[in-house]
Image: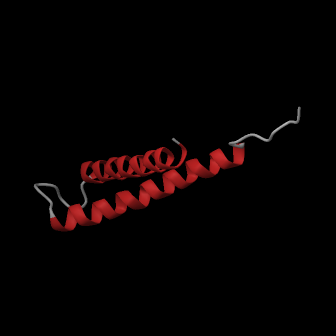
Amino acid sequence: MSAQPLELSGFMIFFLIMAFITISYFMGVLVHSSFMYEDKNNISKDSRNGWVLCMIAGTGITGWMFYYGYYANFL
């Protein structure tokens, strides 16, 4: 019986979390730029609520991409 290495090492989990945060941030910036400068409805460009909503949307989009990537590749 041989010892097998872990499927997910600590470094790999750290890297996945950092990649998720980074991609979420940039996705939120893309949503913010399209929403605030094209489709704004009673929300100013410098609105904190608009920024938070766009970051949440970016996190949701990225979460779906990560989930779908896991589902498509491993299940």
Determine the residue positioned at 29% across, 60% down.
31
Q: How is the image coloured?
A: secondary structure
Q: Report the side of 3 relative to 48 (left or right).
A: right
- Depicted 8 relative to depicted 20: above or below: above
Q: Nearer the viewer, residue 69 or 55?
A: 69
Residue 4 image offset from top left, x and y in percent: 81, 39
How many numbered dots are placed on residues in this image?
0
Residue 40 image offset from top left, x and y in percent: 15, 60
Q: State the image quarter where residue 25 is shown.
A: bottom left
- Depicted 6 relative to depicted 37: above or below: above
Determine the residue positioned at 24% across, 54% down.
47
**Residue reaching furthest to the right:** 1
Residue 52 image offset from top left, x and y in percent: 32, 48
Determine the residue positioned at 50% across, 57% down.
22
Q: Nearer the viewer, residue 4 or 17?
A: 4
Q: Report the side of 17 relative to 61 (left or right).
A: right
**Residue reaching furthest to the left:** 42
Q: Report the side of 52 relative to 74 (left or right).
A: left
Determine the residue positioned at 17% across, 67% down.
38
Residue 63 image offset from top left, x and y in percent: 42, 46
Q: Which quarter of the rendered picture does the N terminus lie within?
A: top right
